[in-house]
Image (cartoon, helix red, strand yellow):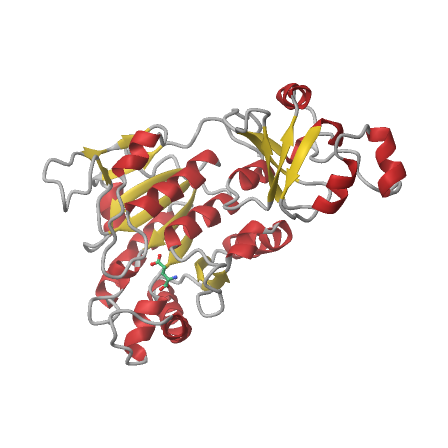
Amino acid sequence: MSANQPLAPYRRVTIKIGSALLVDKAGQLRADWLAGLAEDIAALKAENREIVIVSSGAIALGRSLLGLSATTLTLEQSQAAASAGQIALSQAWAAALGRHGIVTGQILITPNITEERRYFLNARTTIRTLLGLGAIPIINENDSVATAEIRYGDNDRLSARVATMIEADLLVLLSDIDGLYTAPPAKDPDAVHIPLVEAITPAIEAMAGGAASHLSRGGMTTKVEAGKIATLAGTAMIIAKGTEPHPLATLTAGGKHTLFHAATGRAQSRKRWIMGTLAVAGSVQIDGGAVRALKQGRSLLPVGVTRIAGNFQRGDTIAIIAPDGREIARGLSGLDSADARRVMGRQSDTITALLGADSRSELVHRDNLVLLGAKEEVEP
Ligand code: GLU
């Protein structure tokens, strides 16, 4: 394999396939295209890579199966469509990869699974076990039960969370566009393709615009958001065009794409997961002494806390705010917010008196804490 082959450095790869690639405008599966993609995936797997697929298409397939022709579906209709379509989608994947002797496993995910550590650990174990058995996990959002407020809604960010959850080296977003441009090319004829993004700066975010195609929910904006989740956690990301036959073979032959470099340094898996949290459960403001302690790699003690916002449980991710109001760190809280409020500002030795002997003296233990912007040089 040549060294400039774009996928050469990556062993564990998550591939996200958008609805508009898998399903045509009439709501039919693009079976020939899927057969070609499955061949490409089998070739990557034969090179000793672990592959995880995040596949959209349940709603698009389900709406034609159920005869739902309206342009915009109600929430109930799209959840019903997802329910019917997911069966067809799984069958299509099982058949396409089955032709290459590859077994597939289906995993349907809701945000609480990627955001709550005990579910997350369990899902990760299932995925790792499938990979260890030589199977390919096929993942989608559990759209038929996810409620409007508690859902990803787009598989770009979902795939980034999945990729970081399993510590993938690379996330490939197969899309209807061959990468990031300086402006949406459909609107701006002077838009220039960007082959490499070293870091996602506000200027890069501004380029993403907001365009979306007829079937996919995510435009370039959710792709760049996915890039932030992935790259911060040490997973590189590629956006490549998937519409033509054999999109992965085209990519490995050097096809046009945008590569987003992973932020340098590899954080421990727990820290990667904390960094990618979509929504924190609460926040604590700390004083200057605590800021210095955190920068020296120490735990956050209640004595340094000046203000607590939100209601959180022990184990939830909280934001840690400097005196100037900037978020400087994230971590898993060792206490729930009610207990944290009782002990904030107190010395550690008074805490056991207040909360009992088995209580923790740290609000956030240093192993569960990530300084934002800091480079971690820790092998997973
Ligand atoms: N989970 C949705 C589906 O399977 C797709 C979401 C997306 O397009 O990103 O239909």
Q: Is residue 336 visible?
A: no
The foreground one among 132 and 301 is 301
Residue 224 place in picture, x, y as percent: 34, 41
Total numbered badges shown on the rendered structure: 0
Residue at x 87% of width, y 37% of height: 352
Residue 215 place in picture, x, y as percent: 26, 61
Q: Which of the image's four quarters has the C terminus?
A: top right
Question: Ligand 1 falls in which quarter?
Answer: bottom left
Residue 226 place in picture, x, y as percent: 39, 44
Left or right: residue 296 compared with residue 196? right
Q: Quadrant of residue 347?
A: top right
Q: Residue at the bottom extreme?
A: 67
Left or right: residue 333 compared with residue 81? right
The foreground one among 122 and 104 is 122
Residue at x 34% of width, y 36% of height: 8
Q: Is residue 122 visible?
A: yes
Left or right: residue 87 compared with residue 221? right
Q: Quadrant of residue 260?
A: top left
The foreground one among 279 and 198 is 279
Residue at x 58% of width, y 26% of height: 322
Residue 168 place in picture, x, y as percent: 46, 43
Q: Which of the image's four quarters has the N terminus?
A: top left
- Depicted 244 relative to depicted 269: above or below: below
Q: Residue at the left extreme?
A: 189
Residue at x 24% of width, y 70% of height: 71
